[in-house]
Image (cartoon, grey):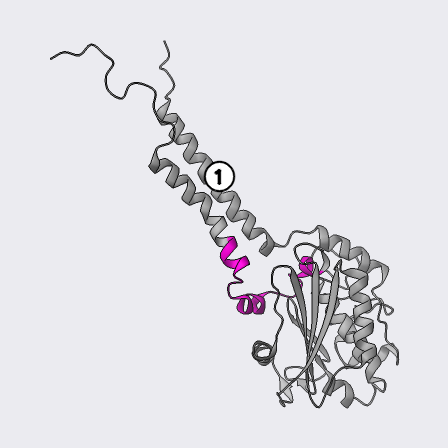
Amino acid sequence: MTGSGPPRGSGRRRVWTRRFAVTVALILAVPVVLGVTVGFFELNPVAAELLTPVGYDAHLLLEPFPDDSLVVEIAYQASAGPPPASAVSTLLSRINETCEKASITVDEHEIGSTATSFTVNGLLSLEEQTRQHWPVPGVMSLFYLYLDAAYGPESDVIGLAYRGSSSAIFEGTIVGDSFLTDAAAVTTTVMIHEFGHELGLVGIIGNAPNEDHAHPPHSDDLNDVMYWEVDTTGISVLGQTPPTNFDAADLSDLNTVKGTPIWTELLPWAVLATCLIAAALIVRSDLRTRYPRPPPS
Ligand SMILES: [Zn+2]
C-alpha cells in the first residue's frame, strides 16, 4: 500500500505538550509554594527569629514595607519592672524618628521567671517561653527582656542585643551599681542603645565611617547613644544623664543601612531568579528541539 499524503506527524506541531507545560509549571510553582508556605502561613516564625543575627532585621524595622506596623514588647520580671515610663516614651521617640511605621504600639507584661543570671542560651529559652509578638507579614516586633538579673558571662554588662529583634536589659546590674545613681536615665540610654544595634548600628550593616574600630560596633562620640561604654557599667563615665540621641553620623549611617542588601532578604529573590532561569532554559531547549535550524546549504 502506498500513501500519497504527507507522513503522519510532519504537519504543524503543537507548541505546548502536556509534559512540557507541567514541567515549566512545576518549576515556576517552587517560589510560589515557598513564599506562601513561609510567608502566609508563618512557617516556624519563632525558630526563624531566634536565629536572626543582630542587625539583620534592620530593613524590617526601618522601612514601611512590608511591615507598616511595629509592636514593642517588654517582658519584665516582677522585681524589676515595668521599666520607667520616661524610658519607654523616649525609646518611642527614637523609634518614631528612625522607623517609618504607620502605627507603633507597646505591650508590657510580667513574666514568671525569678532567675538572677542569664547566658545567651538562657535569654533565648526565656524569650521562647514568654514572647507574645513575633514578626509576621505586615507587623514587625521589637522585644525586650527587662530583668532583675545579671549577664552571667560578663557581670558588668547592662544591655545586650542578642538577636535581630531581641534585646535584654539587666536592670538588676544597673540598680546594683553604686556609681549609677540615676537608674532611670541609664535604663533609657541602654534601651535606645540596643535598639540602635537592631537598626544595624554602628557598622553591623554597611560601612559606618564613625565606627570605633577599637570597640566595634560602636561610636567613639561621647555625646552619642551608640558610644561604646553604654553596654556596660562603664556608662558611668558619661555622667548622670547619658545621651539618648543618635548623633548626625548615626543618622547618616542609617541611610547606608537602608541601601545595603542583607543576604537573608535576597534568598527569596535568588530562588525566584533560579526558577525563572530554569524555566527559560527548558523553553529554549524545547523550541530548539521542535524547530531545529536548517542545515547549511
Ligand atoms: Zn553596644
Q: Which residues are magenta?
A: 35-61
Residue drawn 51% across and 55% down? 36
Nearer to us in this view, 134 or 172: 134
Q: What kind of secondary structure does the magenta stretch mostly adopt?
A: helix
90 horizontally vs 53: left or right: right
**Where does residue 223 sit, x and y in percent of width and height?**
87, 69
Quadrant, the C terminus: top left
Q: Is residue 31 magenta?
A: no
Q: Secondary structure at mark 1?
A: helix
The residue at which mark 1 appears reads as: 277
Location of residue 181 by image quarter: bottom right
Asked if residue 261 is positioned above or below residue 113 in the image, the reply reads above
Indicate yes or no whether the magenta region holds residue 39: yes
Residue at the left extreme of this rendering: 1
Q: Amino acid at mark 1?
A: Ile
State the quadrant of the N terminus: top left
Residue 108 in the image, given as x and y percentages of width and height: 71, 78
Q: Position of residue 277 (x, y in %)?
A: 48, 39
Question: Can the viewer see residue 216?
Answer: no
Splitting the image into 4 quarters, where does residue 192 fall?
bottom right
Residue pictured at 72% horizontal, 53% vertical: 258
Q: Position of residue 67 (x, y in %)?
A: 67, 58
How many C-alpha atoms fall within 10 Å of the one at disc 1: few (<14), some, or many (≥20)?
Answer: few
